[in-house]
Image (cartoon, coloured by chain):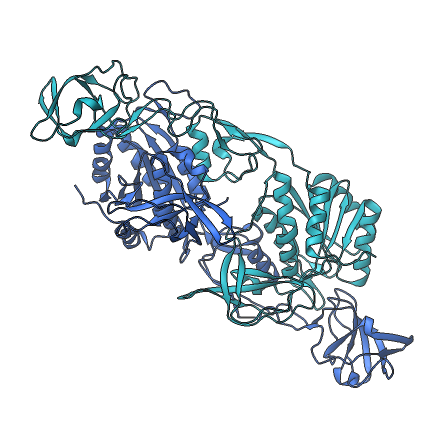
Chain colours: A blue, B cyan
């Protein structure tokens, strides 16, 4: 029998054993890469924009020709032509000349600034009066202003967001190498477990962890494969786990809260591979098992759904990130004030779900107390906090750090 | 010509005109509903759990039979049987009796508490000694502890998270009514605009807003339909917009920064429907247009990608939420300290992208200054802040509220 480990030991073990494992990289169109994890650094291969553009409708000039001009003493410049949108500027500007350029049009060679059309007056077809001086560079977006060839724009390990998709388009990058999404295999076990669409008779319970863990895997950026409900039968459990370890990147096994099942799961894992840990000092979630089969991580998840949920967030989600090559995932947190005490946790780290309310003094957190198996309670919560194992509970009024429940 | 409106006026207008519009509701399996928006309240139709269960391996007893017992004076009870997992308890407990119940098994009628097996000793096949007293309700999960029939568990307008999927399974709800995801039609315009995979010659630019706005629509929970790049031709623009308004829930039109195009877009919208607003006092994003065609909202997005991104987040994303029936979406924010001043914004609200760093004193925000069209700069940023229009910039050291960029 292995000793109950702290959650820090479990996190370290996962890093040590699986921290270097990665899913393969695959090439996909940049336009479909939202939410995927980049596997290689992206450098700009050209200047963006590729030419110096006007950001206003007006006249391209040599700025010095406008110095000192005003409404009463306009600078008169010779209009030599008009730049068309989408076409190169077909002439260059000399001293004393100007050319019309629309917003987004190319500045002709020789010009170094724009005068907005509102600050000009046309005297005749060939002469434009500038009524305000302009400075070199004014109203221009220079070649390479956005990004210069060779510059690092997106780093390997980032999860692509909508504006990153925009940046890839701006650089003309059609395809990107991203991480294949880890396949998370989920197996529910137990003679008493029935599918959610069945009506339980006394003694039976619906499979909650199957749908819960599949949805959690998707929410964390992976893909889920549900292997159904396995009765308490070591032979069938052995065969199914072997198959799952072959086909999946992570194996989650849940249920097995009866004595027979509790004994069977670690034994089967030991037979097929290696049992790393049995029991984590965290509440809820103590009966968690951590092992590997064929080099793949396998978790014996606690049978109680809320416990399974927290164990997933704390140990499985970071592993999904790591398999995809995300460098780190500091879960964003909020500061809030506890409006009631949380009693001592007897030497076990504790996850406590809370409801959040905005008040004049900031966020107020109300702990949702309940037995650890109660999944519907979590639906009333906005996030949770972790009470360290060496802390004697938390007093009313304490400032706490809340990890929000992911919204989508 | 319409006056430039404040962003608050634009938000109010969107609420007034489109605030009651909803996409149809559709029925989908609960197991596939992650991220979808619930359209009807979910009440529990039965008690969960449906029977009173043990949360330990041990003996079901009448608690009063154990009062006063100890290691040295055990309470001797008659063992009348064993409850099997997944089956109803086939007998009841009288005073002086006990029955073995595994974790998750049903408590027999008449029993009101469990004694953990560790606190018992078997004397012979028919007698078990209880070595520690137990209290009524100890180690039991009662029928309805998680949720009681008739209780409101999930409210219409919530976006379903992984643990909500678990709650639906626990209640045995196979299908849910959710909002059809709004279809966001995206059209890029401009003679100078080419597809991202083409190499621009001088004067041409790649279409950034097309991929950017499609990805933004998906990130916000909608679906995107890209209608390609339309040249500056009012007839084709008219035909395409009419088609888009017929097929989509929201129409986004971007580009058209040249004078001709700038005039054409509002004119076409007025011909086909109604032009509500032309120009919003927000930086970047001033040239934004707001109208409707066939009752569908249409946005003339600013041509500069970073501006288009902010306008999307501030005006389009909340509209997608509203069409799905999400009641409110308070964007989660972080407090941070500015490490450099942000200059005055000349009476326009301003969106400023920032990089965040954790320090001992909390989060530090560094503004990313750059011209408004520069999309790759956004990829360096972690979030943004909004400087109100009536504020004269922000001093170094100011505490600011940062809206994080969505991570996926």
Residue positioned 70% across, 42% down in the render: B18
Q: Position of residue B54 (x, y in %)?
A: 27, 27
Is B33 or A43 nearer to us in this picture?
A: B33
> With B183 as the anchor, is A265 left or right in this view?
left
Q: Residue at x 72, y 44 (%)?
A: B16
x then y, percent, for residue B270: 83, 49
Position of residue B109 measured from the top left corner of the image (x, y, whole percent): 28, 16
Could you tell me which quadrant the N terminus of chain B lies in?
A: bottom right
Q: In front here: B89 or B151?
A: B151
Q: How many marks?
A: 0
| Left or right: A160 as drawn, with respect to A211 | right
Left or right? Give the position of B190 relative to B315.
right
Is B335 rendered above or below residue A144? above
Where is B156 relative to B234, above or below?
above
In the drawing, does residue A146 fall left or right of residue A22?
A: right
Does the image show residue B402?
Answer: yes
State which quadrant residue B204 falls in.
bottom right
Is any atom of residue B380 visible in this view?
no
Residue at the far right: name it: A124
**Where A326 falls versus B168 (above or below)?**
below
| Residue B210, image x, y percentages | 65, 53
Observer-nearest residue: A373 or B289? A373
A220 up-or-down from A210: above or below? below
Residue B24 position by quadrant: top right
């Amino acid at each position: 029998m292995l000793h109950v480990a702290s959650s820090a030991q479990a996190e370290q073990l996962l890093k040590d054993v699986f921290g270097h494992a990665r899913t393969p990289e695959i090439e996909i169109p940049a336009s479909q890469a939202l939410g995927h994890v980049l596997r290689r650094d992206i450098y700009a291969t050209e200047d963006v924009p590729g030419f110096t553009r006007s950001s206003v409708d007006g006249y391209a000039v040599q700025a010095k020709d406008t110095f000192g001009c005003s409404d009463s003493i306009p600078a008169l410049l010779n209009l030599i032509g008009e730049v068309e949108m989408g076409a190169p500027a077909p002439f260059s500007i000399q001293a004393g000349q100007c050319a019309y350029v629309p917003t987004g049009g190319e500045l002709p060679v020789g010009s170094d600034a724009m005068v907005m059309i509102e600050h000009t007056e046309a005297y005749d077809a060939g002469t434009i009066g500038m009524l305000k001086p302009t400075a070199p560079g004014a109203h221009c977006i220079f070649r390479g202003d956005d990004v210069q060839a060779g510059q690092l724009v997106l780093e390997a390990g980032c999860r692509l967001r909508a504006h990153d998709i925009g940046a890839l388009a701006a650089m003309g990058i059609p395809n990107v190498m991203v991480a294949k999404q880890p396949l998370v295999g989920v197996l529910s076990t137990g003679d008493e477990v029935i599918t959610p669409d069945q009506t339980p008779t006394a003694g039976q319970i619906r499979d909650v962890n199957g749908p819960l863990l599949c949805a959690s895997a998707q929410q964390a950026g992976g893909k889920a494969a549900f292997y159904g409900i396995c009765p308490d039968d070591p032979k069938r459990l052995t065969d199914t786990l072997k198959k799952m370890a072959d086909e999946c990147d992570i194996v989650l096994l849940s249920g097995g809260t009866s004595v027979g099942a509790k004994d069977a799961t670690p034994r089967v894992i030991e037979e097929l591979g290696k049992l790393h840990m049995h029991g984590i000092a965290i509440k809820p979630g103590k009966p968690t098992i951590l092992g590997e089969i064929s080099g793949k991580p396998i978790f014996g998840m606690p049978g109680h759904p809320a416990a399974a949920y927290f164990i997933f967030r704390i140990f499985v989600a970071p592993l999904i990130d790591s398999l995809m090559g995300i460098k780190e995932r500091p879960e964003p947190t909020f500061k809030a004030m506890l409006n009631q005490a949380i009693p001592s946790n007897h030497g076990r780290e504790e996850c406590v779900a809370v409801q959040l309310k905005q008040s004049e003094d900031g966020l107020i957190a109300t702990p949702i107390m309940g037995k650890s198996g109660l999944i519907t309670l979590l639906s009333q919560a906005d996030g949770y906090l972790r009470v360290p194992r060496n802390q004697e509970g938390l007093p009313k009024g304490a400032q706490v750090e809340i990890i929000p429940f992911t919204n989508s």
